[in-house]
Image: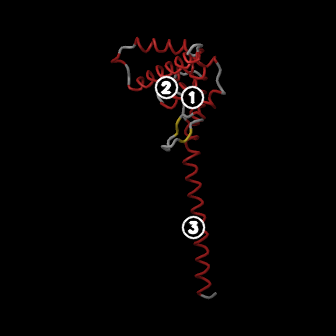
Amino acid sequence: MRPQDLIEKKREAAGNRSYSLSKYCLFRLLFLCCGFPILIAACQQCPPQRSERYCELRQLIKKNLHLSAHLVMAVDSETIEAVSKEVTEKDIPVLVELLSDEDAAIQFGAGGVLERFEEKALPALQEADRKVKQAVPHEISPGQVSSILIIRDTLEHIETRLKNKRPGN
């Protein structure tokens, strides 16, 4: 074989290898951006002493998170829509319980789904708000603060929506 042929063969091999490497890197990047969050959500264990339905709804919210503009997995209208299709009125107490989950995405997802139930969710939300108001302020953890805010925010959204639906408004 001539030296020029060997050089040409090495260039071809290097070119094919760089193409394969770039393809490999692209697949790795896609997995990290798309597959990894779904894999993590599927593998997360349910908090102890929680019902099976709590765990199912928690996993459903996690599975339906979407990549936000800030490149984090977040709750959006698609998340709320997808989860709403899978829940019924019987799930309202579980959704209220999810408002106290340690994961903020779960809290926001549960709050968004509860807003869809409107007046049907009001009694359970009002009861949760009453319990929160009875809590001693120095016993409230930082994680519970976001839960309190989401409960009150969800109540406010539902009440405003119902007020705007009434005749004469």
Q: CA distance from mark 2 to mark 3?
A: 46 Å
Q: Single out the residue that lies furthest toward the left.
A: 138
Q: Is residue 45 above or below residue 151?
A: below
The answer to whether the residue labelled 2 contacts the one labelled 1, judged by CB atoms less than 8 Å apart, is yes
Say which residue label 3 marks.
18
Q: Which corner quadrant of the image does residue 53 belong to? A: top right
- Residue 97 location (% of width, % of height): 52, 20
User: In the rendering, at what x and y percent does residue 106 appear?
Assistant: 52, 29
Q: Of helix, strand and loop, which one carries label 3?
A: helix
Mark 1 or mark 3: name the one nearer the start of the chain: 3
Mark 2 lies on residue: 101
Tag shown at residue 58: 1
Disc 1 to disc 3: CB gap under 8 Å: no
Residue plotted at (58% across, 49% down): 31
Q: Position of residue 137 (x, y in %)?
A: 35, 17
Task: Please identify the residue farthest to the bottom as the structure is shown.
Answer: 2
Amino acid at pointer 3 = Ser
Three-letter amino acid code at the position of disc 2: Asp
Mark 1 residue element: helix
Which sits earlier in the primary sequence, circle 2 or circle 1? 1
Residue in front for this viewpoint, 52 or 141: 141
Residue 57 image position (x, y, % from top left): 59, 27
Q: Earlier in the sequence, mark 2 or mark 3?
A: 3
Is disc 1 surrounded by few (<14), some (14 to 19) or many (20+) residues within 10 Å? Answer: many
Q: How many C-alpha atoms fall within 10 Å of the one at disc 3: few (<14), some, or many (≥20)?
A: few
| Residue at (58% x, 40% y) in the render | 38
Q: Quadrant of the N terminus?
A: bottom right
